[in-house]
Image (cartoon, helix red, strand yellow):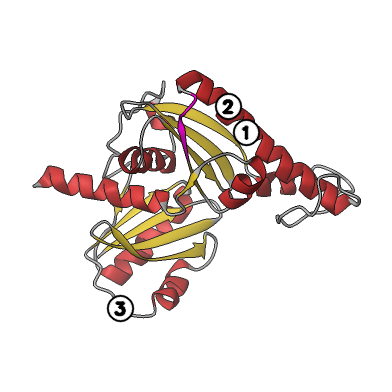
Amino acid sequence: MLLAIDIGNTNISCGIFKGLRLTRQFDIPTNARFKEIFVKRLKSRLKISDSIICSVVPKQTKVVLRDLISLTKKKPYIIGKDLAVPIKNLYRKPKQVGQDRLVNAYAASILYKTPLIALDSGTAITFDVISKNKAYLGGLIVPGMGISLKALKEKTALLPLVKLSRPRMLIGTDTKNSILSGIVFGTADLCNGIIKRVRQYIGKDTLVIGTGGNIRLIEKYSKINMKIDKDLTLKGINLTYRDALKKQI
């Protein structure tokens, strides 16, 4: 069994793989006590042969690394340090690309037809573009809906913090619904516009693969025709590990 862990700014996503099959998945809040919650969520002892971490939160990586060594008696692999994502990276400065973005791009390029756009809607919203020959071209990054809602609260004197949910109407008739409609419909149209522009650049029939905690809201209100793969990042972590194993044989 392989334990794949994706450490994001909001949640730590954990996946148990048997070969290429994801047998179990659960999330732990990034700022929570990882070891304590992990043991409770796992419930039963599994024979974990290896573990591998993809992280965009260096401080939390150290905590999870320590806890996993304690639990499994084996040091996990860290993507970007111990293992490289096996995709041709055309970023001008390749080391600047988040490992989660490369993992998403690699998984999408293996599992789906290229060219494609991997759209990940989480704390940030990322658009990662993969060419027909499966090279990582680069992408775009915009604030996620949760960040936008918090910014309105923090940067204004009177606007409240609104919990992200489906808007009840397009034209809000109170402050809460005006904010919610603005953020959700505005983000949906932003995604529509970016996808349209990228398709003009690499092909009008370019596939969109959607993932991330808020992707269903993007799908519903943007009307973008996309394939949802909520476990894309975990699958990419597993595929990166499998590729490394093949090279060792």
134 versus 200 height, above or below? below
Q: Nearer the viewer, mark 1 or mark 3?
A: 1
Q: Nearer the viewer, residue 108 or 17?
A: 108
| Picture disc at residue 45 | 3
Indicate left or right for 17 with 169 as reference: left
**Overall secondary structure of the magenta section:** loop
Residue, x 77% and y 49% (percent of image)?
180
Label 2 with label 1: CB-CB less than 8 Å:
yes
In space, the residues marked 1 and 3 are separated at their CA atoms by 45 Å
Q: Residues within 10 Å of mark 1 (few under 14, many from 20)?
A: some
Q: Which residue is mark 2?
A: 196
Label 2 with label 3: CB-CB less than 8 Å:
no
Q: Residues within 10 Å of mark 3 (few under 14, many from 20)?
A: few
Q: Nearer the viewer, residue 188 or 88?
A: 188
Image quarter of the N terminus: bottom left
| Picture disc at residue 192 | 1
Residue 11: x %, y % from top left:
52, 58
**Magenta stretch bounds:** 204-208
Q: Amino acid at mark 2?
A: Lys
Residue, x 63% and y 29% (percent of image)?
193
Q: Amino acid at mark 1?
A: Asn
Residue 43: x %, y % from top left:
39, 80
Residue 106: x %, y % from top left:
34, 39
13 versus 108 height, above or below? below
| Picture disc at residue 249 | none
In space, the residues marked 2 and 3 are separated at their CA atoms by 47 Å
Name the image quarter holding residue 42: bottom left
Residue 154 visible to the viewer: no
